[in-house]
Each structure stands twice: as structure tokens, then as C-alpha cells.
């Protein structure tokens, strides 16, 4: 049987003068699962309205052969860089990809990583995944 998850109580409403973010309803933010057809079974195991922090999950969104293929495309087609900061190389590797015309750099811990243009496989993965997130049009996809 599937393991039951313990649900945490909702945090209290933010009172004037307290830390927190304006609610997503107040600022007009929607969760991706709210944008999708109802037959897609999005769940949100993490919901913190106070800090507008959410983690969505769509079980079995892609079939195993497709996920295996996408994994292998990403594994073979990603150039990982080890950026250096003020104190030398950072203990991580980073790949930063953007969609033209974006040329923004990734910055972390004093290091800077130049962008690599989305490879063709990224467009294919986005085309398969973004409609499942309620974003069917390429103009809506992350860049």
C-alpha cells in the first residue's frame, strides 16, 4: 500500500506588520496545476501560501520510453561547467541554458556562468512537458 503522507497544518494568515508575501490570489498568481485540464491529476505536497512556496507533482506525466529518451538526450547533450568564484572553483557543476534572445548569465557565489542557447532537444522536451503544465503555446514557455 502507498505510504500515507503526513499533512502539515496550514500556516496562519499573515497579519499586518508580519513577514510574508502577499497571497497569490491578491497578486494574481496561478499554480500550473490550476491551468491544466481537470483530467490531469496535479497534486501539491508542499503548499505555503504565506511565503508563496509550492511544489507540484504530476504522477506519470510521461511514459517510461519517453523519459528514458529525454534523460539520455540531456545527459549526452549538456555541457557542465565548474564556475569559479572569489575563492576559486565552486564545488558544483552548472549548465545554464536560455532561449534566444535572452543572453542573461547565471550568477552564484561570486561566479558567473554564460548562457548556452537551448539545443534542439530542449525544444522537444518543452513541447512534451509544457502543455502538461497548462502552457501549450511556445510563447508561454520558460526562457
Image (cartoon, rainbow, N blue to C red):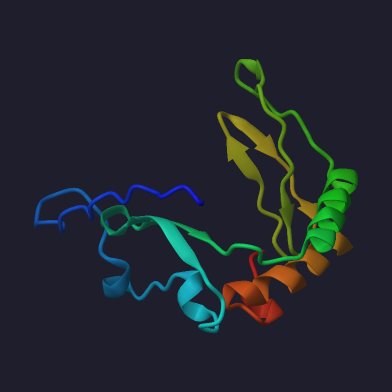
Which quarter of the picture shows residue 94?
top right
Residue 63: x, y in percent?
76, 65
- Front residue (pair 95, 130): 130
Q: Is residue 111 above or below residue 70?
A: above
**Which quarter of the picture shows residue 50?**
bottom left
Expressed as whole percent of the image width and height from the top left, the position of residue 104 reads 66, 53
Q: From the viewer's perspective, tell me whether residue 137 is left or right of residue 65.
A: left
Q: Position of residue 131 (x, y in %)?
A: 66, 77
Residue at the extreme front: 1
The residue lying furthest to the left in this view is 16
Residue 88 on image: x %, y %:
67, 16
Q: Is residue 139 above or below residue 60?
A: below
Residues 38 and 97: in front is 38
- Residue closer to the observer: 132 or 92: 132
Residue 92, image quadrant: top right
Residue at x-position 79% and y-position 59%: 64
Task: Please give the name of the residue rendered at 72% of the width and 47% of the height, measured from the top-left corner.
Answer: 96
Amino acid at each position: 500500500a502507498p505510504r500515507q503522507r503526513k499533512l502539515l497544518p496550514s500556516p496562519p494568515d499573515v497579519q499586518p506588520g508580519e513577514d510574508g508575501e502577499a497571497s497569490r490570489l491578491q497578486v494574481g498568481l496561478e499554480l500550473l496545476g490550476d491551468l491544466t485540464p481537470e483530467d490531469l491529476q496535479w497534486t501539491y505536497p508542499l503548499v505555503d501560501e504565506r511565503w508563496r512556496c509550492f511544489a507540484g507533482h504530476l504522477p506519470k506525466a510521461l511514459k517510461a520510453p519517453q523519459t528514458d529518451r529525454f534523460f539520455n538526450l540531456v545527459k549526452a547533450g549538456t555541457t557542465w561547467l565548474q564556475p569559479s568564484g572569489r575563492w576559486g572553483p565552486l564545488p558544483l557543476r552548472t549548465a545554464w541554458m536560455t532561449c534566444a534572445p535572452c543572453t542573461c548569465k547565471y550568477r552564484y557565489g561570486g561566479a558567473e556562468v554564460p548562457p548556452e542557447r537551448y539545443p534542439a532537444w530542449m525544444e522537444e522536451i518543452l513541447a512534451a512537458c509544457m502543455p502538461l503544465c497548462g502552457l501549450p503555446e511556445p510563447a508561454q514557455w520558460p526562457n
